[in-house]
Image: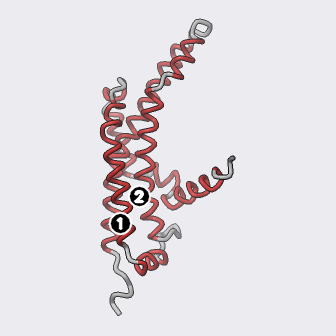
Amino acid sequence: MFSQWKPLFRWLRRYFHAYGGIRGVAGSPLFGIALIITCLSYSNWLTPNWTDKVETLIPSLLGFSLGTYAILFSIISTRLKGALRHLKTSDGVSYLESINATFFHFILVQVLSLTWATLFQGSWLVDALDYFKPSYPWLEVVELWAFRSGSFVGFLLLVYSILLTIAAALAVYRLALIKDPHEDR
């Protein structure tokens, strides 16, 4: 029953390593800009209006991302893919895997944003806290901070997923600048 979990986590670890790990995400200028925009846009996440934006923007962006990803990798020649496998970044990751990781990260953050918004709109946590609040009045504060934290993370994921469009475009741009070493012969 759980035989598919191990390969899933193995592939996610591989992608995360190719993307740069926690340092790659936290040190990214795009993540930093998303964090700043989220902090400055507090009125958007103090009320749960951001979930409507996620439901409106992310499905279209996700379709565009998957389409671009599929088209891009279907038109790259086998020779160029081979050449990109041999070119390595400073971390020892092939350029091909690095570009793949960039697109996968773009898509993964969009899916996380959509999933987070769906879970945020669910009332399971509120219902559980409401059930126990009469016995534990301090849960009122927990509920407030859980709401604010969840809303902040959700809006951050939305902004970050939009800004990752730049990273995906830069990956295509970098790819366009790489020449097939066999062409010069």
Q: Which mark is residue 72?
A: 1
Q: Which mark is residue 81?
A: none
- State the CA–CA distance, disc 1 to disc 2: 10 Å
Seen in the picture, residue 34 relative to 40 is either above or below; the reply is below
Dots 1, 2 in contact, CB < 8 A = yes
Q: Which mark is residue 103?
A: 2
Identify residue type, mark 1: Leu
Seen in the picture, residue 18 relative to 95 is either above or below; the reply is above
Seen in the picture, residue 55 relative to 125 is either above or below; the reply is below
Seen in the picture, residue 97 relative to 7 is either above or below; the reply is below
Q: Name the residue at 37% across, 82% down.
A: 180
Q: Tell me: 137 left or right of 37.
A: right
Foreground disc of the pair 1, 2: 1
- Sequence-wise, the earlier of marks 1 and 2 is 1
Number of numbered tags placed on the structure image: 2
Quadrant into which the C terminus falls: bottom left
Q: Secondary structure at mark 1?
A: helix
Q: Nearer the viewer, residue 111 or 25?
A: 111
